[in-house]
């Protein structure tokens, strides 16, 4: 058996187009929210 | 020689490091993390603790502190930079050392003396040691498990008994030129026999000897 715990970060971001918001959040993930050496990330845009 | 000892909110080993540096004949300047000018110092130490509360990941926020631009400049100039414990984690997050530090293999905080051996003497921390020299100093960390998917990092001191799962048994890692070193155990807590070890002197004296007065 193995156990894995992931981190979920909810962000409220102002913006009109989902792709623009996604691009900004992906950049945040690369810069600080995730450590790309160790971690993968998936961005979901809702609303 | 003057050493800048950087203090982030949550750093807690700065006085131990300053005591060690002055005991060994250097001068230590405690420098707040918002400081943007370290030009009066010959080298830098990032001490242990919990910079910015270790929120998000260890060192993840500290790397954005204003002082880190100056630390990076000094590192890229080839001048000595040492990160101890949390300082090691910060240097990895800042990209000044390869890899990253994750939770110990057994998911428990480790707080005990560890036995190590020097595997690479061509760095600012290990220059006064011999290859294979044994070092026994305290390890005090939860995220001390070094991983380096690139396998490019230089392991300069390794544990003899694998306390935390660290890749290649790494206790200390250097950048390619050897002027930036991170070590997970605490050499500053091992400079007096009365406290259980003076092996840390071999490392910190070497670091002081690597400093060239500005």
Image (spheres, coloured by chain):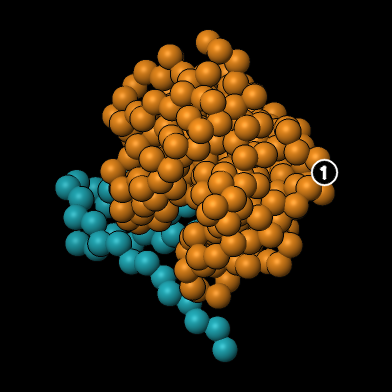
Chain colours: A cyan, B orange
Q: Position of residue B186 (x, y in %)?
A: 54, 50
Q: Nearer the viewer, residue B163 or B75?
A: B163
- Seen at 27% across and 52% down, the residue is A18
Q: Nearer the viewer, residue A6 or B157?
A: B157
- Left or right of residue B140: residue B115: right
The residue sitting at 44% across, 47% down in the picture is B48
Estimate the x, y position of residue B163 in percent, counting from the top left: 63, 67
Badge 1, how many Cα within 10 Å: few under 14, some, many 20+?
A: some
Measured along the vertical axis of the image, is residue B193 above or below residue B206? below
Residue most extreme to the top: B214
Q: Position of residue B36 (x, y in %)?
A: 34, 22
Q: Which residue occupies the foreground of this view, B93 or B208?
A: B208
In front of the other: B111 or A39: B111
Residue marked by disc 1: B131
Residue B103 can be seen, yes or no = no
Question: Residue B190: where, in percent of width, then height?
Answer: 57, 49
Q: Residue at x 37, y 67 (%)?
A: A7
Image height check: is B41 above or below B183?
Answer: above
Residue extending farthest bottom: A1
Q: Chain of mark 1?
A: B
Residue pictured at 32% horizontal, 33% vertical = B33
Q: Is residue B163 visible?
A: yes
> Which element carries disc 1, helix, strand or loop?
loop
B189 on left or right of A16: right
């Amino acid at each position: 058996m193995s156990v894995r715990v992931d981190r979920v970060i909810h962000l409220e971001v102002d913006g009109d187009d989902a792709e623009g918001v996604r691009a900004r959040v992906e950049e945040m993930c690369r810069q600080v929210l995730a450590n790309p050496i160790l971690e993968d990330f998936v961005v979901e845009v809702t609303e | 020689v003057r050493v800048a000892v950087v203090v982030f909110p949550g750093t807690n080993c700065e006085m131990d490091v300053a005591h060690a540096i002055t005991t060994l004949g250097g001068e230590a300047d405690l420098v707040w993390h918002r400081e943007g000018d370290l030009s009066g110092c010959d080298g830098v130490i990032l001490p242990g603790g919990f910079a910015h509360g270790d929120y998000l990941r260890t060192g993840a926020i500290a790397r954005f502190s204003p002082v880190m631009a100056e630390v990076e400049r000094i590192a890229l100039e080839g001048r000595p930079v040492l990160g101890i414990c949390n300082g090691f984690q910060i240097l990895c997050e800042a990209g000044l050392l390869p890899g990253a530090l994750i939770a110990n293999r057994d998911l428990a905080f480790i707080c005990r003396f560890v036995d190590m051996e020097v595997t690479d003497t061509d760095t600012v921390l290990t220059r006064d040691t011999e290859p294979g020299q044994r070092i026994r100093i305290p390890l005090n960390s939860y995220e001390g498990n070094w991983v380096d998917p690139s396998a490019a990092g230089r392991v300069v001191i390794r544990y003899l008994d694998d306390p935390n799962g660290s890749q290649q048994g790494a206790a200390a890692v250097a950048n390619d030129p050897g002027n930036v070193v991170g070590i997970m155990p605490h050499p500053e807590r091992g400079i007096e026999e009365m406290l259980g070890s003076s092996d840390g002197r071999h490392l910190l004296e070497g670091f002081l000897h690597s400093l060239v007065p500005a």
